[in-house]
Image (cartoon, rainbow, N blue to C red):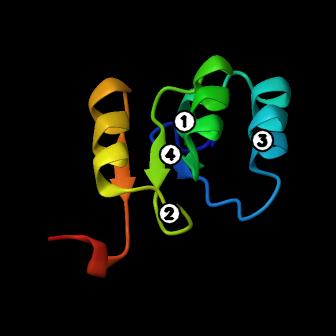
């Protein structure tokens, strides 16, 4: 990251996501804005936002909320992107 200041990292932590995001925020605050955390719940989104992450990706592949509730969440929260399985897109 030092050698390439344009480098961005999209996280994909399958377990202990909160702990990982906390670790980055506490140990690498100068690089935190270059991490794009992938979150899997609204709780994780709120946690990441409170920790100072801006470019948050809401990943739906382990999310079983209704399409309507996900759309409402996306309308009312600043998301960088939303990822989902192809069969969920229509």
Q: Going from the N terminus, do you reach mark 4 or mark 2 first? A: 4
Q: Going from the N terminus, do you reach mark 4 or mark 3 first? A: 4
The answer to whether mark 3 and mark 1 are in CB contact below 8 A is no
What residue lies at 50% left-to-right and 46% top-to-bottom? Answer: 7
The label on residue 34 is 1
On the question of residue 31 being in view, the answer is: no
Q: CA distance from mark 2 to mark 3?
A: 20 Å
On the question of residue 28 being in view, the answer is: yes
**Secondary element at image label 1:** helix
Is 13 placed left or right of 52 in the picture? right
Q: Going from the N terminus, do you reach mark 2 or mark 1 first? A: 1
Quadrant occupied by the C terminus: bottom left
Characterize the local packing of mark 2: few (<14), some (14-19) or many (20 or more) Cα atoms within 10 angstroms: few
Please tell me whether mark 3 or mark 1 is closer to you in this view: 3
**Secondary element at image label 2:** loop
Instruction: Please give the residue where the numbered disc 3 appears in the rendered image.
Output: 18
The label on residue 8 is 4
The label on residue 64 is 2
Please tell me whether mark 4 or mark 3 is closer to you in this view: 3
Q: CA distance from mark 4 to mark 2?
A: 28 Å
Characterize the local packing of mark 3: few (<14), some (14-19) or many (20 or more) Cα atoms within 10 angstroms: some
Q: CA distance from mark 4 to mark 3?
A: 19 Å
The answer to whether mark 4 and mark 3 are in CB contact below 8 A is no
Please tell me whether mark 4 or mark 2 is closer to you in this view: 2
What residue lies at 36% left-to-right and 47% top-to-bottom? Answer: 70
Q: Going from the N terminus, do you reach mark 2 or mark 3 first? A: 3
């Amino acid at each position: 990251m030092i050698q390439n200041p344009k480098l961005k990292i999209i996280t994909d932590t399958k377990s202990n996501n909160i702990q990982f995001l906390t670790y980055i925020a506490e140990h690498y605050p100068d690089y935190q804005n270059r991490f794009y955390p992938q979150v899997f719940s609204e709780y994780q989104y709120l946690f990441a936002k409170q920790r100072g992450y801006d470019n948050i990706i809401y990943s739906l592949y382990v999310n079983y909320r209704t399409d309507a509730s996900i759309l409402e969440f996306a309308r009312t929260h600043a998301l960088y992107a939303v990822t989902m399985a192809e069969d969920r897109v229509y």
